[in-house]
Amino acid sequence: MSKKPNGRLVTVIDSQQITPNMQRISFQADDLSDFPADAAGGYIKLLFTEQGDTDLSQLGADERPKMRTYTIRHLRQSLDQFDVDFVRHEHDHNGGGFAAHWSQSATVGDTISIAGPGEIKPINVDTDWYFLVADMTALPALAAQLTKLPATANSYAVIKINHGDDKQALTKPDGIEVIWVIANTAKTNLLTAVKTLTWQQGEVSVWCACEFSDMRALRTYFRNDKAIDKDNIYISSYWKSGCTEDGHKIAKRNDNEAQLSG
Ligand SMILES: Cc1cc2nc3c(=O)[nH]c(=O)nc-3n(C[C@H](O)[C@H](O)[C@H](O)COP(=O)(O)OP(=O)(O)OC[C@H]3O[C@@H](n4cnc5c(N)ncnc54)[C@H](O)[C@@H]3O)c2cc1C
């Protein structure tokens, strides 16, 4: 993605609360023919002013927009339309939460500028079994990864949701078992849920995206305890509890540097 994002204005054509904590917004663009056909699962940046407004004409000449990262859940390229699933998280509009606030109040006809798409590292689809892990922010990306697995793929997709009713029907190979981990219950911990699953024989592909602290705990498990080859693992934090995306970006950079020097 370019350093200076070139905003593309898109219009809200639908907004549905698909589960208690997920808002699906459908967008109409003028022309998405330059998007890769397989852009579903890739990410876009939503662009805001410093105050969290979507009217970028308010930006000063040398002011950069604030960016929030979201996944393309579905792409309907022939119609120049796409969907994004927004976690309905709590926010204090003054301290951030620009995307949460916008997505919970957007109505048909509203517009917002986006940049992208960018591509996340694809899963290695040439292994004996698969281990996918996500929280609700990465559920849209995990859902896209599931559709890219071979029909014979087996083992696990572990997904942490905020409420039992946040489960979604997912298109997936029959051999992939979906394990829903419900927050605020006894089985609240992603790492515990992952560790209780039987480790299979043979080469594994791991795809994992979630909150920063959960990611670090899972990274230790997969990389250190299970010594998974780096080509067979995608592990990323999608947000950080207590930080806006800007703060998360800094924490992520520091963490990457510590990993490289450690
Ligand atoms: C590649 C990538 C793809 C992503 N795709 C999606 C997606 O499709 N859908 C999606 O919902 N998110 C997605 N995220 C996560 C999203 O970018 C962050 O949650 C982002 O911080 C939301 O911005 P905001 O303006 O709402 O809140 P911020 O201004 O960034 O944060 C305000 C406060 O809200 C808290 N917060 C942020 N996110 C959450 C959350 N999910 N639950 C509880 N508290 C939270 C922060 O810790 C902070 O305290 C993705 C992130 C990445 C890196």
Image (cartoon, rainbow, N blue to C red):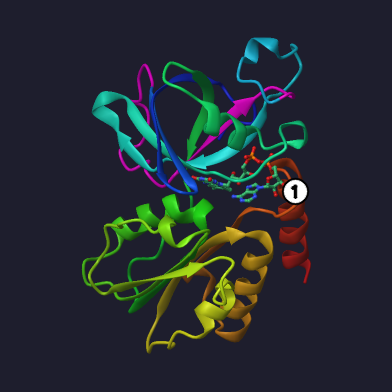
Mark 1 vs ligand 1: CB under 8 Å? yes
Q: 28 or 219: which is nearer to us?
A: 28
**Does 251 lie within the magenta span?**
no
Q: Quadrant of the N terminus?
A: top right
Residue name at image x 73 percent, y 52 percent: 253
Q: Residue under label 1, please give it.
A: 243
Ligand 1's quadrant is: top right
- Residue 28 is left or right of residue 106, and the answer is left
Give the answer, above or below, for where 232 lies relative to 165: below
Image quarter in which the C terminus is found: bottom right
Position of 221 with respect to 119 (left or right) is right
Q: Looking at the image, which residue is at 52% across and 41% down?
A: 70
**Residue 28: which quarter of the image?**
top left
The residue nearer to you, when weighing 28 against 105, is 105
Task: Kindly indicate the quadrant of the structure image that contains residue 157.
Answer: bottom left
- Vertical arrangement, residue 3 with respect to residue 174, above or below: above
Residue drawn at (28%, 72%) of the image: 153
Q: Is residue 159 above or below residue 66?
A: below
- Stretch in magenta: 29-51
The reply to whether residue 228 is visible in this rendering is no
Q: Is residue 39 magenta?
A: yes
x and y, in percent, of residue 219 in the image? 61, 72
Where residue 254 appears, as percent x and y from the top left, is: 78, 56
Q: Residues within 10 Å of mark 1 (few under 14, many from 20)?
A: some
Q: Nearer the viewer, residue 17 or 207?
A: 17
Residue 60 against residue 2 in the figure, above or below: above
Q: Identify which residue is drawn at 60% across, 80% down.
A: 221
Quarter of image, res 16:
top left
SS for dot 1: loop
Q: Position of residue 79 (x, y in %)?
A: 26, 25
